[in-house]
Image: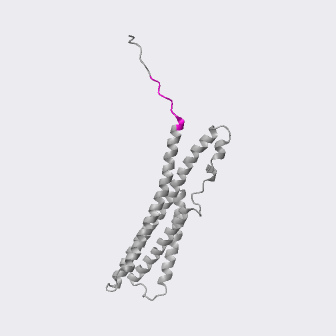
Amino acid sequence: MSTGSQSNKTPDPLNVNQILIAEFQYVAQTAFQANEDRARVSNYFLVTTGASVAAVLSANLETTQPGTVYFGFTILFALLTAVGVITVLQLARLRAAWRESVLAMNTIKDYYIQHFPGDELRTAFRWKTVSIPSASKRRSVAYLLALSVALIDSATAGAAIIYFLLWLATFPDNSPLIIPIGVLVAVCVFLAQTVAYVQWLNDKKT
């Protein structure tokens, strides 16, 4: 029996196909999760806003002092506005995450196309890297969801300002300036959110 000989096992070579398949499946799951989270955060905001407004409409406030009512509505609508702005930013990051996942999936497909002889794979894939929609596509479901949330929380921002002015008694209840000021604030908040949405889509550091 030889004492100087040892059995050395050579490790199996890496299976490139298995690695790429596992990577593709993982990236596909992240893209799916981004879509699921997008629906979840938008539904959470819509349900929260709807429940809050329904509670306000069904509350009996006749015996409550007007100042207390105005202050309470100011806080409520300000909180709804803050939640809405956060939701818009979340939707932007989820849209960017989805696109990054799709880019990663198409990178793997491009690898196979380059290393597969002929045009079989090239013609089999309809979704290609060059056809991936931009993150800020205006007619996408993600953009429309963000737009819906921005419209609602802009309205709550205007309402918060109106009730805040009433609470401060800066203007009389019948002042014609209260509504225009609220509308102006709502428009400014909406425009600011559309700008922030695009910035958070394209800024990889956020």
Any magenta on residue 10? Answer: yes
Of 99 and 197, which appears nearest the observer?
Answer: 99
- Please tell me which residue is depicted at 49% across the width and 80% down the height of the picture: 181
Please state the horizontal and vertical placement of residue 96, each as a whole percent of the image. 52, 56
Q: In this view, does 135 lie to the left or right of 168?
A: right
95 within the magenta span: no
In terms of depth relative to the viewer, which is nearer, 194 or 5?
5
Residue furthest out toward the top: 1
Q: To which quarter of the image does residue 43 belong? A: bottom left
Q: Which residue appears at 51% of the width and 38% of the height? A: 18
**Which image quadrant for residue 72?**
bottom left
Left or right for 115, reference 75 = right
Residue 17: x, y in percent? 54, 37
Prevailing secondary structure of the magenta residues: loop
Residue under the image location 44 percent in, 80 percent down: 162
Q: Where is residue 58 in the image (x, y as percent from the top left)?
A: 37, 80
Residue at coordinates 62% horizontally, 37% vertically from top-left? Answer: 115
Quick check: can you spot residue 206? no
**Which is nearer the eye, 114 or 65?**
114
**116 or 150, which lies in front?**
116
The range drawn in magenta is 9-17
Quarter containing the N terminus: top left
The percent coordinates of residue 39 (x first, y second) are: 47, 61
**Residue placed furthest toward the right:** 118
